[in-house]
Every structure is written in structure tokens, then in C-alpha cells.
Image: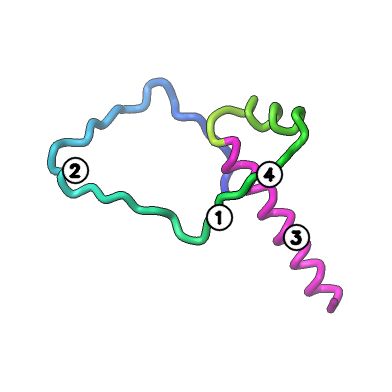
Amino acid sequence: MGDYAPTPADAPSIEPDEAFWRNARVVTPSGKASIHLRVDNDVLAWFKAQGRGHLTRMNAVLRSYMEAHARKTRKDGA
């Protein structure tokens, strides 16, 4: 999980050609679950204020917490 870095305004734009679309396939990521989650308004507003991808960043924060907790649990032997 990396830091969010917006695309520079002068980044080259690449338009996919017809061969790309002819060979394109829809791929559903594995291992993701769709849930309904209630969060405080200010928490959601803060993540949204960071720009596109707020749900991905929220997932990254939860993963980081989970992994830190798992390391602590293993270290403590619990």
C-alpha cells in the first residue's frame, strides 16, 4: 500500500485502440466483500476530502490496523 499521488496534469494520455477493446475482459477482483458500513460523518468527509479512492484508502487503514494488531498478538504470544 503506497501513498496517494495524484496524476500530474502534464502526464501523457494514452487512448486504447480497437485491438485493446476487442481483447478486453471484465475481471472481478477476488477476495473482496461488499458490505454496508456506518461511519461517522466527519470520518467519511475527511477521507472524501483526500480525493478519489476514499474507499480504497479506508480499506488500507483498516488493513494496516489489522496487520499491526496481528503482529502485536504474535509478539505477545496470545
Label annotation for residue 33: 1
| Whether label 2 touches label 1, CB < 8 Å | no
User: Which residue does the numbered mark 3 point to in the structure image?
Assistant: 68
Q: Nearer the viewer, mark 2 or mark 1?
A: 1
| SS label for mark 3 | helix
What is the x, y in percent for residue 78?
Answer: 85, 76
Q: Amino acid at mark 3?
A: Ala
Please determine whether, in this image, residue 18 is positioned above or below residue 69. Answer: above
Q: Whole-percent x and y of residue 52? A: 53, 30
Mark earlier in primary sequence (2, 4): 2
Left or right of residue 9, residue 26 in this image? left
Q: Secondary structure at mark 2?
A: helix
Q: Say which residue appears at 59% left-offset and 40% top-offset.
A: 55
Q: CA distance from mark 3 to mark 2?
A: 41 Å
Secondary structure beneath label 1: loop
Q: Nearer the viewer, residue 45 or 15?
A: 45
Indicate whether residue 76 is drawn in magenta.
yes
Residue in the image at 61% along x and 49% along y: 35
Please name which of the two marks, 2 or 4, marks the residue nearer to the observer: 4
Q: Which residues are magenta?
A: 54-78
Name the residue beneath numbered marker 4: 37
Q: Position of residue 53 (x, y in %)?
A: 54, 36
Horizontal placement of 37 versus 54: left or right?
A: right
